[in-house]
Image (cartoon, grey):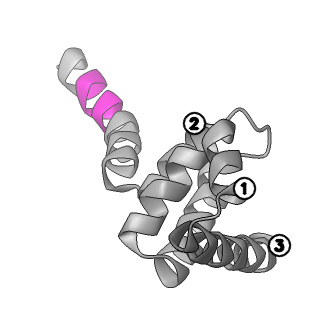
Amino acid sequence: MKKLVLAGAFGALVLPVMATSVFAGSIERACLRSDRGSANPAICGCIQQVADMTLTGRDQRKAAKMMADPDLAHEVWISKREADDAFWERYKSFGQTAEAYCAG
């Protein structure tokens, strides 16, 4: 009986964490994986909410890749491609909105 209770308690602790990572968006996952000290589930979840409101799924995947690879972010920033310029403007707007929305 003790093993059953322990297994149930373990499941109650682990399953919410697993569900969070399974259902988290690409921005939230990238945020949680970042090495920034301020990254935590509440902040990363808030940032994902803003991403869902302001960016397409494609933009979110690109932004998540840039969070993991600063060199890619620099390449997009300096690119002369019209599509990259348009994405960068959407990305900046997302960042400003997330900063205001998730700051407190």
Residue 9 located within the stretch drawn in magenta: yes
Give the residue number, with chain letter if any, for mark 2: 33
Give the residue number, with chain letter if any, for mark 3: 104
The residue nearer to you, when weighing 18 against 50, is 50
The kind of secondary structure element at disc 1 is helix
Question: Is 11 positioned to the left or the right of 58 in the image?
Answer: left
Residue at 59% over, 51% down? 41
Query: From the viewer's perspective, is residue 7 above or below residue 34?
Result: above
Task: Measure how far apart labels 3 and 1 are at the Cα level.
Answer: 32 Å
Bounds of the magenta span?
5-11
Give the residue number, with chain letter if any, for mark 1: 78
Residue 32 located within the stretch drawn in magenta: no
Query: From the viewer's perspective, is residue 72 above or below residue 82?
Result: above
Q: Are marks 2 and 3 in contact (CB under 8 Å)?
A: no
Quadrant of res 34: top right
Question: Is 7 positioned to the left or the right of 62 in the image?
Answer: left
Task: Measure how far apart labels 2 and 3 are at the Cα level.
Answer: 22 Å
Specify the principal SS of the magenta part: helix
Query: From the viewer's perspective, is residue 91 above or below residue 22?
Result: below
Residue 31 seen: no
Q: Quadrant of the N terminus?
A: top left
Query: From the viewer's perspective, is residue 14 above or below residue 56?
Result: above
Residue type highlighted by circle 3? Gly
Question: Is 6 positioned to the left or the right of 68 in the image?
Answer: left
Residue 51 seen: yes
The residue nearer to you, when weighing 7 against 68, is 68
Residue at 63% over, 72% down? 85
Sequence-first disc among 2 and 3: 2
Number of other residues with Cα within 10 Å of mark 2, as a class: few under 14, some 14 to 19, many 20 or more: some
Horizontal and vertical percent position of residue 79? 65, 58
Q: Quadrant of the C terminus?
A: bottom right
